[in-house]
Amino acid sequence: MNLYIFSEDLRIRDNKALYEASLEQKGLIALYIINKGKNEEHGDSLAKLKLKLLALAEIRNLLVSLNIPIKILHSQDIKDEPKEILGFCKKNQITNIFLNSEYPFNEQQRNKKLETLCNKNEINLKMFDSQLIDPNKVKNNSGQPFKVFTPYSKKIRALLTPNILQEEPEPLKQNRKITDEDEIPSFNEIYDKELNFSIGNYPLTERSAAKRLEEFVENSISNYKELRDIPSLSSTSNLSSSFAIGLISSKQAINQVFSNSDGTGTGQFAWVNEIIWREFYKYITYHYPHVSKGKSFNPKYDLISWREDENSFINWCEGKTGIPIVDAAMRQLNQTKWMHNRLRMITAMFLSKNLLIDWRKGERYFMENLIDGDFCSNNGGWQWSASTGVDASPYFRIFNPITQSEKFDPDGKFIKNFVPELNECPSNEIHNPSKETRSSLNYPEMIVDLKSSRLRAIDAFKSIK
């Protein structure tokens, strides 16, 4: 009997482990593990957890038609999962386990422990690489893992042959269903909480994700590079949540681009680059596991004396910094559970540089709120902004949020959408209202001086030898 275990791969198509598990057609169970302890430890947002459960309910129906029942296993800690999986296997006479690889440290350790238990109990564990290309097969000319994105991306693009981009077929229908499927519990049953935002804006099925991808590639991708940094426009693919839970794979995304063009248009090239960035951060997490342990990629920056300023951190979280673009971005996150990518960089750099607050606090806050929270991408993005990470922004290159606002939200359309108290703000002050305007509109003063705080951050980084 075969067992397939879901991870961040909630799809039927282009799912290597699921397809391989189905080939014998003699009986296959799909297992989904609900682990509240792991969710809390990793900081997974409730929005993302709800999205995953809704997506799983949709997948359940597809698998039932293939005689593949889904079973639910409850666990309390990622360290407990191997033993509990083994117990499930013994109870259901499982002889082969199939799963796609995950790259954060805890997941790697879980899989190693599971492999040890399987070997002792004569169960075959078969793990498949879930990236475009096995991270062990992508090295620089010295045979070492890459640390800089540009040469890594060139290497990846050179390796993207038709054979590499060949997608896995749908799993084969089993000759018989060997057990009844479980009902997928609702979000409220598990977490006993309500979420006050609409999840209807995010794809729930791989079919709807594929449709959104197709529409983006056909209608919008050609202008992607020119428009992607304007937060008031819907000019990105809006597929980040689908990538995060695995409704769609990197391979499928790139194939869709190549099916419509040769991928060399400026918009096409730029968007594929964003897919490769996702791959790069997973690659870094795999090869440099210390980034999964709350450590800076560049160890010397663990010596920075970050400021302990809880009031400023709370103001940042709540969108009350007195800097319109930062406040609008944070309120977008809090209200919609998503934030435009340009704004992620602006807010992250403001927290880690101007406020000189430990980037790990911001990283955690994002993960706890983002519906598209992906550990590798979130960690990589925060370390890039904080200048502590791989191929990071130099510590002396600090975004001025007002300049960024003037460039990417020139009319203040995005700001006014999320900071309604500035709706009556004069257009020439929307990026930095005068003291009088702030007072009349009940909008706060800046919590920090941008010029002096920039110099303070540079001095803090310079002091690390």
Image (cartoon, grey):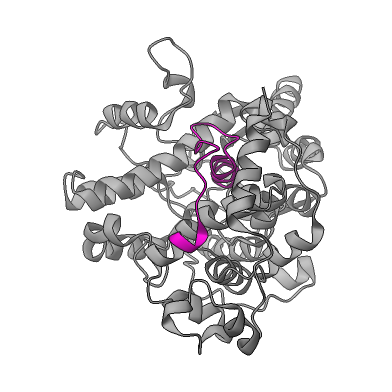
State left or right for residue 292 relative to residue 266.
right
Please check the rendered image and state whether residue 451 is part of the magenta-colored stretch, yes or no: no
- Residue 359 is left or right of residue 88, and the answer is left
Residue 54: x and y in percent read 59, 67
Location of residue 6 in the rendering, given as x and y in whole percent from the top left corner: 59, 47
Tell me where residue 51 sits by quadrant. bottom right
Residue at left offset 57%, top offset 24%: 287
Q: Which one is nearer the viewer's eye here, 279 or 363?
A: 363
Task: State whether residue 111 appears in this view.
Answer: no
Relative vertical location of residue 60 with respect to residue 455 in this rendering, above or below: below
Magenta stretch: includes residue 388: yes
**Relative horizontal placement of residue 185, taking residue 432 as reference (left or right):** right
Q: For this rendering, which residue is in front, 394 or 372?
A: 394
The reply to whether residue 331 is visible in this rendering is yes
Q: Given the current orientation, which residue lies at the most extreme top position?
A: 142
In the image, the segment drawn in magenta is 375-403
Residue 353 percent location from the top left of the image: 62, 47
Q: How many marks?
A: 0
Residue at point 66%, 44% (across, down): 456
Q: Quadrant of the N terminus?
A: top right
258 or 313, which is in the foreground?
Answer: 313
Picture quarter with the C terminus: top right
Q: Is residue 391 above or below residue 11?
A: above
Residue 314 position (above or below residue 398): below
Between 334 and 455, which is closer to the camera in this rendering?
455
Q: Where residue 438 sits: x, y (%)?
A: 61, 81
